[in-house]
Image (tube, rainbow, N blue to C red):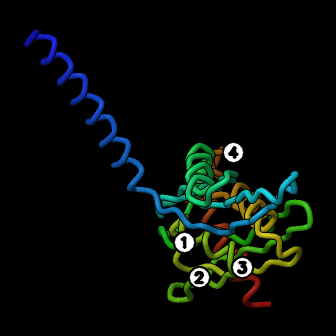
């Protein structure tokens, strides 16, 4: 009898340790609630309300994802959206850990965004949903502009489309079979020519 209790305690302890590991892993992520939408279904005897949540999750070190969840209660919708966001994380190469490498455009449906790197001290110049994405990503200096719809879902998808097209000099060098130094020197040379013109 005593042995059975001991084995049950070990199993419980194992479950507790796994839960603590999961909580520790979850604690490295920052989640930002971007939008909550309330929808009503008209049924016999009144309306039934439901909620849809859009959440952005990131580790503030170059990984970010977004998710969408629906439920009857707001906290449950947020939880579902957060879980989905953690499953759809993408890695974005950052320059000096604070900004992007180059200007990039993204679109999704009617949502169009332009995202540009910025010098140190600029801060995050972005509106609503875009700001949430950059803060979760860990970008400190960036300039962005939304040119199309103001629908938060399409704006978030458009900025993710832009971030997926972001490339670091290392990625370009690998693709072209050159060294990183060659790629960077060519880029610096082009900047000098533009300044002289």
First along the sequence among labels 1 and 2? 2
**To which residue does mark 1 refer?**
135
**To which residue does mark 4 refer?**
175
Q: Which of the 4 image quadrants contains residue 155?
A: bottom right
**View extreme (right): residue:** 110
First along the sequence among labels 3 and 2? 2
In the rendered structure, find residue 144 and report the number of the disc placed on it: 3
On the question of residue 174 being in view, the answer is yes
| Label 1–label 2 contact, CB within 8 A | yes
First along the sequence among labels 1 and 4? 1
* In the rendered image, the vertical position of residue 105 relative to residue 66, given as above or below: below
| Label 1–label 4 contact, CB within 8 A | no
Q: Position of residue 64 (x, y in %)?
A: 58, 57
Q: Point out the frontmost of discs 1 and 4.
A: 1
CA distance separating discs 1 and 2 = 8 Å
The quadrant of the rendering that contains the N terminus is top left
């Amino acid at each position: 009898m005593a042995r059975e209790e001991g084995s049950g305690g070990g199993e419980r302890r194992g479950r507790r340790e796994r839960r603590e590991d999961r909580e520790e892993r979850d604690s490295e992520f920052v989640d930002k609630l971007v939008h909550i939408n309330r929808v009503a279904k008209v049924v016999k005897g009144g309306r039934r309300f439901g909620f849809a949540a859009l959440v952005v999750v990131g580790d503030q070190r170059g990984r970010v994802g977004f998710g969408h969840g629906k439920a009857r209660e707001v906290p449950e919708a947020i939880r579902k959206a957060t879980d989905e966001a953690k499953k759809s994380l993408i890695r974005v190469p950052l320059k000096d850990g604070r900004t992007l490498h180059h200007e990039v455009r993204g679109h999704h449906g009617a949502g169009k965004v332009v995202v540009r790197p910025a010098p140190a001290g600029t801060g995050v110049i972005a509106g609503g949903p875009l700001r949430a994405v950059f803060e979760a990503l860990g970008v400190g200096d960036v300039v962005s502009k939304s040119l199309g719809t103001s629908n938060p879902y399409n704006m978030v998808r458009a900025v993710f489309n832009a971030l997926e097209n972001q490339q670091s000099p290392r990625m370009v060098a690998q693709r072209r079979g050159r060294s990183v130094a060659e790629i960077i020197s060519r880029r610096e040379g082009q900047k000098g020519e533009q300044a002289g013109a």
